[in-house]
Amino acid sequence: MYQERTATRPIGSAIETNKVLRNTYALLSMTLIFSAAMAAISVVSQVSYGIGLIATIAGIVMLWFVLPRTANSATGIPVIFAITGLLGFGLGPIVGYYLAANPTIVMTALGGTAVIFLGLSAYALTTRKDFSFLAGFLFVGFFVVLAAALANIFLEIPALFLAVNAAIVLIMSGFILFQTSSIIHGGETNYIMATAGIFLSLLNMFQALLHLLGAFGNE
Amino acid sequence: MGWEKIATAVLLGAMLIFIFPRMRHALNNAPKGSAEDWKGFLFPIALVVGFVVLLILLVK
């Protein structure tokens, strides 16, 4: 996963990298559209938070146990669509809640996520910096944030909720840089796994932005 | 406490268990960044912070 840095790479390797990058962005855009459609179905049918949670858990279980076993075959494509569909469906109740309260918040969070993703991807692609040194920092940060989120289920401290969501936006920004750089530098050669990683970063970032904007917008 | 809260707690606990070995692997194997590398990371992150503050001001 963490390959040594090299100043120059063979032409064949560069072509392979471009292919992975192109396939990743193509699959990412298709899964995002599919996930948004599933979220829309979830919102329109007014799915409860419990059903949304079950869909999310099913998506995460597939992500952990099914995707790694299928990512190197054609079966990986329907699996990644199933995962992103379930996660999108699971997001429906939260999106529905904010749409009912203030639709501007949802649109702002959506636009904000898109701008951050495009900006960070453009930065990683144009500078071609190697962000593999971020791996330890990002995983430790994510671990701490998850532990804080778990504690806050029982503590219910609003300030901690905001801090966790602010931290998620920053950590997911770091993951986008890390994952894009990993594709560019040949660390990630499987476009299905690359898509899953970037999709999760975007989903987490959108959800965290939604909560942050909702809290500051008094919703 | 509703079952949704318990299920969310179990899910977050499982995520912690799942991430822990990856975190250890990353800490042991990832290359160390130079001051220049960190500057190259902090610059776009600072822009993200500024942008999020702008979004918050927009919805306030």
Image: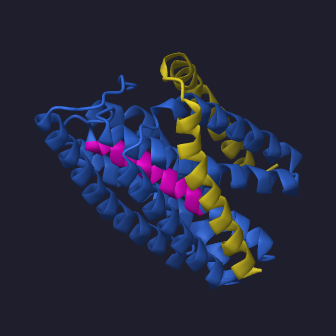
Residue A191 image point, x, y percent: 27, 44
How is this picture coloured?
Answer: by chain
Q: Is residue A136 magenta?
A: no
Residue drawn at (56%, 54%) of the image: B44
In which quadrant will I find the N terminus of chain A?
Answer: top left
Residue drawn at (52%, 63%) of the image: A116
Q: Determine the image quadrant of residue A169.
A: bottom right
| Vertical order, A118 against A195 (above or below) | below
Q: Is residue A199 magenta?
A: yes
Q: Is residue A109 left or right of residue A70?
A: right
Residue B14 seen by the camera: no
Instruction: Name the outermost residue toward the left.
Output: A12
Q: Determine the image quadrant of residue A128.
A: top left
Question: Tag count in the figure?
Answer: 0
Residue drawn at (61%, 26%) of the image: B17
Q: Is residue A129 left or right of residue A56?
A: left
Q: Label the blue chain with its letter.
A: A
Magenta: main secondary structure: helix
Q: Determine the image quadrant of residue A136.
A: top right
Residue A93 image point, x, y percent: 60, 67
| Vertical order, A98 against A52 (above or below) | below
The foreground one among A153 and A144 is A144
Magenta stretch in the rendered image: A191-206
Residue A214 seen by the camera: yes
Residue A82 image point, x, y percent: 35, 52
Q: Label the yellow chain with its letter.
A: B
In which quadrant will I find the C terminus of chain A?
Answer: bottom right
| Vertical order, B6 against A215 (above or below) | above
Q: Is residue A194 left or right of residue A87?
A: left
| Vertical order, B3 against A111 (above or below) | above
